[in-house]
Image: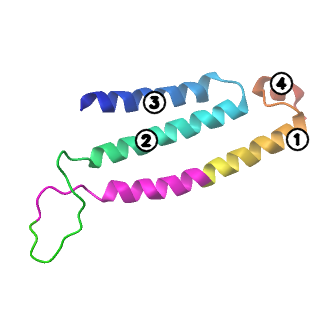
Amino acid sequence: MMAVYVLCLALFCVGVYAILAKRNVIKIIVGIIIAENAVNLFFILTAYRVGGRSPILSPGQEIMRVVDPLPHALVLTSIVIGLATTALLVAFAIRLYEKYGTFDIEKIRELKG
């Protein structure tokens, strides 16, 4: 089970690497999306229980091992916020391309216009 958390951390590190090391705006946006999804995956993994079931109860049913629904609700909210953030970043990238004609951050810095 620990390997899943390590893979989640590796996915997050790939996203952070893309954000920090790449100079293309589109690649930076993809890195943000990857890091976002790694965090969402981590939240879902924290709620997982072996043999767990959904917390929907019927009359006369005992509460055994149920999965925690709070991280699932947080991830649903995070997905909506992530979609809005991604749409804003893509709109920003389109405007940068219209103004400067490139997605390269270094060339945009040189133009200063």
Query: Which numbered disc flags the more N-terminal residue, 3 or 1?
Result: 3
Q: Which label was assigned to residue 98? A: 1
Q: Amino acid at mark 1?
A: Glu
Q: Amino acid at mark 3?
A: Leu
Would you call the spot at circle 2 few (<14 residues within 10 Å), some (14-19), or many (20 or more)?
Answer: some
Q: Amino acid at mark 2?
A: Val
Contact flag, marks 4 and 3 (Cβ < 8 Å): no
As helix, strand or loop, the secondary structure at mark 1 comes to helix
As helix, strand or loop, the secondary structure at mark 2 comes to helix
Would you call the spot at circle 4 few (<14 residues within 10 Å), some (14-19), or many (20 or more)?
Answer: few
Distance, label 4 to label 3, CA atoms, is 29 Å
Foreground: 11 or 22?
A: 11
Q: Which label was assigned to residue 39? A: 2
Q: Which residues are magenta?
A: 63-83
Q: Position of residue 87 (x, y in %)?
A: 67, 51
Q: Position of residue 101 (x, y in %)?
A: 89, 33
Q: Which label was assigned to residue 11? A: 3
Query: Which numbered disc flags the more N-terminal residue, 4 or 3?
Result: 3
Distance, label 2 to label 4, CA atoms, is 32 Å
